[in-house]
């Protein structure tokens, strides 16, 4: 099956700094990627939809200036958490849509962000 | 807006029991429904994918059903084992995927 990777798997940063998380589709080209956030003991919440070569579409309540998404190539999308605060600490998961398999979504392993 | 609900939120059973997890969704215009397993602090493992035209899928001890018109799906786990302990998430796909809050399953030896 299609493989999606994320880097880093864990990151700890200080409040006020920015953190970049990468999402890569390893063996397919993904024109669309999705970013989800999961707080402890809660489900995944869609943050934004990332389309290659165009601006991301953010879900209601997600600050686009705080969560910068760049989908510059067909295999890479990045999420940058700017001026991170402790309340941004969460598990961030990306997924990529595989066009050759009925546009099924494949999920990355997630990135655990801790802001101190 | 699609809303996905999973019942129960938590379930604890002794080893060997058969069990059913429930998922309901408000908008029946879906492409597919997928059940995932998530272990603590880990990513998602896909268990079963049911296309909108299908009524059920089976894999080993797992069986998932879909009644699209009523907006319901069930995940049946036969002969549960301690290794089945995890959170089970249901997700429906339209343009994107929307998740339920999950059912935390504990299977006691």
Image: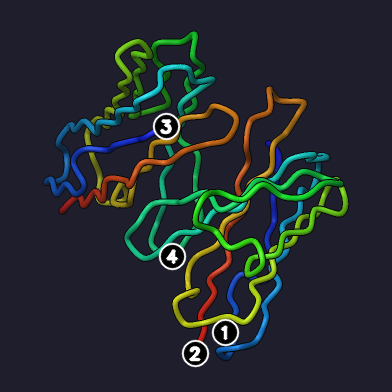
4 or 1: mark nearer the eye: 1
SS at mark 2 in the image = loop
- Element at label 3: loop
Instruction: Tell me if mark 3 has few (under 14), some (14-19) or many (20+) residues whose alpha carbon lies within 10 angstroms of its own.
Output: some
Dividing the picture into quarters, in which one does residue A38 lie?
A: bottom left
First reached walking from the N terminus: tag 2 or tag 1? 1
Front-most of residues A40 and A55: A55
Label ID, residue B2: 3
Residue A93: x and y, percent? 57, 56
Residue displayed at 77% across by 26% down: A100
> Marks 3 and 4: which is nearer the front?
3
Q: CA distance from mark 2 to mark 1?
A: 7 Å
Whether tag 2 and tag 1 are in contact, CB under 8 A, the answer is: yes
When asked about the image quadrant of residue B70, the answer is top left
Between discs 3 and 4, the one toward the N terminus? 3
Q: Are marks 2 and 3 on the same chain?
A: no
For the residue labelled by badge 4, is the local secondary structure a helix, a strand or a loop?
Answer: loop
Residue annotated with mark 4: B41
Image location of residue A14, percent across then percent down:
57, 91
Indicate which label's residue lies in the foreground, 4 or 2: 2
* Above-or-below relation of A99 to A63: above
x 49%, y 56%: residue: A61
> What chain does mark 1 sit on?
A
The residue at which mark 2 appears reads as: A116
As helix, strand or loop, the secondary structure at mark 1 comes to strand
Q: Chain of mark 3?
A: B
Instruction: Name the residue beneath numbered marker 1.
Output: A12
Return the x and y of residue B50 as percentages of the image width and height.
47, 20
Per the model, the C-alpha gap separating discs 2 and 3 is 35 Å
The answer to whether residue A15 is left or right of residue B72 is right
Respond whether the residues carrying marks 4 and 2 are from the same subunit: no
């Amino acid at each position: 099956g299609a493989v999606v990777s994320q880097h880093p798997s864990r990151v700890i940063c200080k409040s006020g700094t920015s953190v970049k998380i990468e999402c890569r589709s390893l063996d397919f080209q993904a024109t669309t990627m999705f970013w989800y956030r999961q707080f402890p003991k809660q489900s995944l919440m869609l943050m934004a939809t990332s389309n290659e070569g165009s601006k991301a579409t953010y879900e209601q309540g997600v600050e686009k200036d705080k969560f910068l998404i760049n989908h510059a190539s067909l295999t890479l999308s990045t999420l940058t958490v700017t001026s991170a605060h402790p309340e941004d600490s969460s598990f961030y998961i990306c997924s990529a849509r595989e066009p050759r398999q009925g546009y099924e979504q494949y999920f990355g392993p997630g990135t655990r962000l801790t802001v101190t | 807006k699609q809303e996905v609900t999973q019942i129960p939120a938590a379930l604890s059973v002794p080893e060997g029991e058969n069990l059913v997890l429930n998922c309901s969704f408000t908008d029946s215009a879906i492409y597919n429904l997928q059940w995932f397993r998530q272990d603590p602090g880990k990513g998602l493992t896909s268990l079963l994918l049911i296309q909108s035209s299908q009524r059920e899928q089976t894999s080993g001890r797992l069986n998932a059903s879909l009644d699209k018109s009523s907006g319901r799906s069930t995940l049946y786990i036969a002969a549960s084992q301690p290794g089945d302990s995890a959170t089970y998430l249901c997700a429906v796909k339209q343009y994107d995927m929307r998740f339920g809050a999950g059912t935390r399953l504990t299977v006691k030896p």
